[in-house]
Image: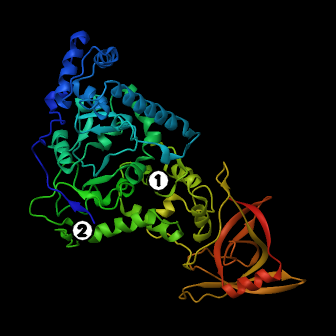
Amino acid sequence: MARLVHPQSKLIANAFVLTPEQASVKYLDSGVAAGQILAYLNNIFKTSLTLDHPDLRKLLEGFVSQSMDFGAIYARVRSCWPDPHASPDTLFEGLSAIETFGTENESDRDNSVSGQTIHKPYNIKPRRLWDLYAHRVIPFHYSLLEGNLTPQYWAISHSWTNDMAGVDTAVNEHEWPVPLPVGVTLEAVRTELLKLGAQYVWLDILCLRQFSSDPVSENKRKKEWSVDVPTIGLTYINGTSQVVRYMNGLGRAFERSGWGDPRHWLNRAWTLQEMKFDSIIAGGPDEIINPEEERSDETGELLSERLALVGELEVVRDISITASEFMTVIAAMKRRFSTNPVDKIAGVAMLFSSAEMPLYNEAKSEEDAWALCVRHLPRPVIAELLFQFVTLGDGGVTWRPSWRQLMAAETPTCFVSRSIDAQVETILDEGHAVYEGPSLTTRFTPLAYDGQSQYRHGIVQVKVQRKNEQFKVAFSPLAPVIPEGEYALVGDQNLGRWILCTRKDGPKLQKVTVVNMKDDDSDELRNTGSVTRRRWHFT
């Protein structure tokens, strides 16, 4: 169930929370500034440290030499500033620990990439966080506490509005223009999040490098996005302790209208990977107590009905994936919108990939991005693509559907809701799927079809000890017309689901369709001893 919170306008009264004016104080003379900064920090933390400690002077003067304002300095020391009666050495021990973590985190991110693959993406932490107390964006590791390197941060899920405009701000040290909806300020969003109890927050407009007219920044963005965009979902699933949703745009009030708008939170492709149980809905007007009981002004539907679909996807994400669950996500993607078409594919990759993920490339075509995504899906999911779809793919290979076919109004899937026991070994460079499984050479004869029955049927003949045995198979009316002739049959390990194929050169097969055999016939076929195991390349 999603909870609702009401918008706040006044900054929370907390001695550890800087005002925008306090955070923006700049220092010119590093020799004088060190004493001023230390006095300010001592006042906040009620400590009495002095510059007699040589490392403390060096630390503070180093910050000033990098042109940091007080907010940026405060953000880097506050998580490990010593208690009033502790030794100043604890500050440097803490900084050393978290900076070592930061170096290791950056190394993990760099070493995770090989070719077009991100290995062990679950080990990658966010690159940046927004420190609400300091009102500054910081490298992730400065949010950690010495002695407790477990991340503690919140994440914001919001819909991007049509009127977002870039704002130059010291909050991200002017690294890139921060896109904000007209009339919304970072200060107002910060106040609301502080009232909720957040300290550190991941918010894409601040923590994911955004578009810039500066060529240097743009090159950095493309490089960072290749890893950061695919792993956004892990920020919400594994890292964050709380997700806050803005349904009608960042910082904007929750409304009962606009639920069908392509820009609404309910209709965005990216929000599928930002799901977390017990998320908070922000921006609630005073008259709304429980948003899930609110109805759309346009359709009359309850918000709880729309969010039930989100809940269903949350469950799907956490269970073993079959064709049914895969198609649940695909169906959700069909209904949703993205600025860049390949973003939908990146979302699918995040939801289904675990040990490996494909790099993100916004310039790829949809079919190229989908082909790369398929390579990184879990092997059982790839087998579902091979065994569950009854028509030929039209995206360069025929063994699996193209992205265009998946996004079509109706995608024909296998007609029997039964599990399969199969795993594709690998995907070759040319996109062929390698699978080793039960194999037969057969003669297939289609039976007459009345045009109305749920299934079409055919007879497969199998040579058993110099005589032909016949087995009846069923297949979808959506399958292509299959002429009588010689075919190869390749089955799952249970011999219940079979791929009818034509032979090509060597180990290559071209899928024709998928057929099903009754359990009794599967058992009888297994007992004949005529089934062999072979490794095939499906084109």
Q: Quadrant of the N terminus?
A: bottom left
Residue 274 seen in render: yes
The spot of residue 162 in percent (x, y) is 24, 48
Say which quarter of the image contains residue 138.
top left
User: Residue at 62% across / 57% down in the picture?
Assistant: 397
Which one is nearer the viewer's eye here, 191 or 330? 191
**Residue at mark 1:** 350
Residue extending furthest right? 466
- Graded by Cα atoms within 10 Å as few (under 14), some (14 to 19) or many (20 or more), the crowding at tag 1 reads many
User: In the drawing, does residue 130 fall left or right of residue 388?
Assistant: left
Task: Name above or below for residue 242 compared with residue 260.
Answer: above
Identify which amino acid the numbered label 2 is placed on: Leu
Identify which amino acid the numbered label 1 is placed on: Met
- Graded by Cα atoms within 10 Å as few (under 14), some (14 to 19) or many (20 or more), the crowding at tag 2 reads some
For the residues labelled 2 and 1, the Cα–Cα distance comes to 26 Å
Quick one: SS at disc 2? helix
Which one is nearer the viewer's eye here, 28 or 343? 28
Task: Name above or below for residue 290 compared with residue 477.
Answer: above
User: In the drawing, does residue 536 fall left or right of residue 396?
Assistant: right
Residue 330 seen in render: no
Q: Quadrant of the C terminus?
A: bottom right
Which one is nearer the viewer's eye here, 366 or 240? 240
**Residue at mark 2:** 303
The spot of residue 483 in percent (x, y) is 70, 77
Quick one: SS at disc 1? helix
Sequence-earlier tag: 2 or 1: 2
Residue extending furthest front? 85
The spot of residue 156 in percent (x, y) is 29, 49
User: In the drawing, does residue 402 fall left or right of residue 168?
Assistant: right
User: Residue at 58% across / 65% down in the picture?
Assistant: 385
User: Residue at 31% across / 29% down in the picture?
Assistant: 76
The spot of residue 289 in percent (x, y) is 14, 65
